[in-house]
Amino acid sequence: MKPVVILFFAVITCVYGPVLAQSPIEKDGRVTITSGGQAYDFLPRFMVLFNSADPALALKPAGIAKVSYNVPTWKTTDTANADYVQQKVSEAVAGDGFDDKILRSKNENRTANIYRSGTSFFLTANKVIVTLDSTLLLFPENPLFVLKAWIKKTRSDIQIHFVLTPKEDGFYSVGYIGAPSLDKGQVAELWQPLIWTEKRAPQQPYMTPSFMATLPTTLVNDGHHSIGVMADPRHLPFQPLPLLENSQFGIALCNDAGKLQPQVFAPVMGGAGSHMNAGNRFSFSVSLIVKPLDITHTYEQLAKEKMGFRDYRTNATVSMNTTLDNLIDYSKTHYAWFIDSLKGFAYSTDVPGAVKNVSSLNPMELALIRDDKDMFETRAYPLMEFMLSREKFLFTLDSTQKIQSPSRKLKGPIAPLSELQVLYNLLGRTHSFYPLMAEKEFGGARVRNLDEKQKGRNWINAMFMFRLTSDSSYLKLSMELADQYLADRVEKKMEQFGDPMVSSNFFWPTFTNNWSALLELYELTGEKRYLDAAHDGARHYTLFTWMGPRIPDTLVTVNKGGKAPMYWYLKSKGHRQMYYPEEKVPAWRLSEMGLTSESSGTSTGHRGIFMSNYAPWLLRIGYYTQDSFLMNVAKAAVVGRSESFPGYHMNTERTTAYEKVNFPLHRHKDQSVNSFHYNHILPMASMFMDYLVTDAFVKSNGQIDFPSEYIEGYAYLQNKFYGAAKGLFFSLGEAQLWMPSRLLKTDDIALNYISAKKGDTLLLAFMNQSLKPVTTRVTVNPSRVALSKQAAVKLLSPLGQVQALKDSSFQLMVPASGIAAIAIPGADIPKGFQDQLLGAKAGSTTDYAVIAEGNAKALLFTMGTYARRLYVFLQDDDTKWNSAKLVYRINGASPKEMVKKEYPFEFTVPVEMDLPIRFHLQLTGKDGKQVQSKETELGR
């Protein structure tokens, strides 16, 4: 039901939106909006703030328990108003995204309360003048300024426009403070970007500057309606990129009485445009919001109606498959900065001398699906050893390094229980050490990233223990604990930061329920309550995605003068300027709509990150729940954004630099546009793979469906893992996902594709990313698959058209935003690494040993029919031992040895299939004395 609006007690009808009726208007100038029997009064109340001197606007850590976040603060000469206490920041809080100007500036008298940022004057209209098209509000005279306001109606909106005319030079800000206010106990839910969600209320009048507002309003819901005051989108321009220094307004939710009341302040005190000269006019506009919807649906509606959010992206310069090919090629170059000796990607952007890995499953999946032995040998296998041996994701040999709390210990596994389960299943369910490690993880607790301790016994790990063991008691436990989680976390809105499974909040997934894992539980059990909870979490996650600025239908000039942007953080580290040609491109290609900032603590510097791993999850949940908003956000987050690895984020100005295929092909110090977290490269590739497979699933209405596992990673780097099991491809079952690089060439970049095989049949599905039908020529790469002259093309999907095959090519029509799937029988599909890894698995053997000397562990990996390897690592470090030697014999052959004179002490030995290996360690201590372990045999 559309709301009935009363303006100054005049009835506003609802024909195609509110329309002002001709009725008497009361002198007090209030707007009463009535909807569903509820009346909401918007009073003609304003506050004007004044400073004769610059209040030195600056972002500072808010000092809120269990959350890292920066808020605007102002200098004050009145010590009674100096309520901001300078926060002590840990030495570990440093690196890219953390600004020392914010974190470690000098202590001074400041306030974070917008009401105390200057001398405040509260004004209520004392005269109302009705005209033909608006209502004029006049306010009492003031020696410093004149304030006037107009209330104007449109067919779907009620707006307040105000004009401030200063009488003296100085710094001014005007706040509209007339919206309905509620006690915190009356609120069903609230929202102020970026961190105040559910029922986590601001404890004082903190302001969100416009550059940090994913939507230019705050919202409060009383159980019936969501109420807000929204800045006109024209005050959040597309150019230049929103930053603190160009923010034209701020929004707040808590008022000076401690009640929740949507407010808008413009300009930001001490910010752009706030210094005014006498006689110069300042004008601003807001809209009054009352929606009979919850917070997330109000957010969606405002995003569409006010900001123009829609299905707005398509492949910009290449298909996602080409991007994926280029990205993986890049991941194998020296520019990707993989340090072989440390088995990890350099993390020097944040922590000099450190490496960081997310998961071995990302390169493992890519090696498997893409039939890529090189990816396995150079990335997947080393990362598997790393994830089973290291104590933390962040590893450094520098014992003095404190930034982000790294570890130099081999006290693994750092792999989460879910990863142990996936590796166990993938490698044939024969290795004894994966269940042993998983059981230990389930019964204990571990710090994997930063200083966050994770308890092993929870509903998520119980789900993965069920997948690992097939023991139904684990599934029962998972559902019991998950139901309690629903009661504690989902059915109740969070009132404080932290939650039953998260001790503090930093990355955005910690601010919502664990909706990706809830979706996994739904797909495992079919229980709708888990899907409902995942849907709720996903919708709340969209509150962190940018829905502005509005995208103009224009071309935008970027890289002016041939220079790419220079990110201030990299400039401070001595990085060199990058150069890309000046060009004009459609604004939509440059938009952050659909992306998120990195985290609560780094949102001020990392505006829109390209690591949008949430996209495939939103797409799938949107499909299950018929929620087109989630599906459009998902598409906006990934489609058409780069030709290779785009680096991490938007931050300084708009550019096409990160679109370019050669963008990542530079040395670290030659990157100037954005930061490179090299451990993100392969998770991004998994994200693309997940999106492609999920898009095929959605567009085929579930007729293309490949079983998946779970990549847990850390932070927001969760995605599905494909390729370990065969799936459905329309009428064909037992199809194996098989996507070697550059398999196809299409003449139209709007098409993405996935490919699979079944025997000698090549299976292809094309997903159209444009809003128009696409007809194009497709060529199968003959170096990948040889097609006989007798081969024919068969259409599998109900829609689409395909013509006869000729010289490895065929013509194809794919419906707008749709799918066309085909089969080509009689193809010569070569057997390779994928077949070997998924091949016959060896029977049960002894594959694990604990060795007291050196506190060592020995693991014998059997990887299908492809390879067998012994991995031995010492948990003791170089504070105890000078060197370590591994002496081994395979099947009784002559002994061989490997020596490590530097830490870490670890050894990898190839072992022939079905042959045992005997070995012992010889260790030399710091005192020069030698110790030898007993001989151990594995593989018998």
Image (tube, helix red, strand yellow):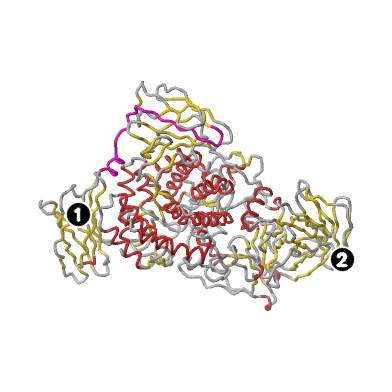
Say if the magenta span includes residue 294.
no
* Residue 61 appears left or right of 839: right
Q: Is residue 805 left or right of residue 435?
A: right
Q: Is residue 635 left or right of residue 226?
A: left
Residue 544 on image: x %, y %: 57, 56
Query: Label 1 crowding class (10 Å Cα cut-off): few <14, some 14-19, many 20+?
Result: some
Relative height, residue 89 to residue 282 (above, below): below
Report x, y in % for residue 311.
59, 42
The kind of secondary structure element at disc 1 is loop
Amino acid on which the number 1 mark rests in the picture? Thr
| Mark seen at residue 584 | none
What amino acid type is highlighted by mark number 2? Answer: Asn
Q: Residue 845's mark? A: 1
Circle 2 residue: 126
- Using the image, determine if residue 804 lies above or below residue 447: above
* Within-10-Å neighbours for mark 2: few <14, some 14–19, many 20+: few
Q: Is residue 579 visible?
A: no
Nearest to the observer: residue 516 or residue 225: 225
The percent position of residue 461, horizontal first and vertical second, equals 39, 61
Q: Distance between the residues labelled 2 and 1?
A: 89 Å
Indicate the quadrant containing the C terminus: top left, top right, bottom left or bottom right.
bottom left
Queried whether the magenta region covers residue 823, the answer comes back as yes
Instruction: Using the image as rendered, state which of residue 60 and residue 128 is in the foreground.
Output: 128
* Residues rendered magenta in the picture: 815-839
Q: Can residue 712 be seen in this view?
A: yes
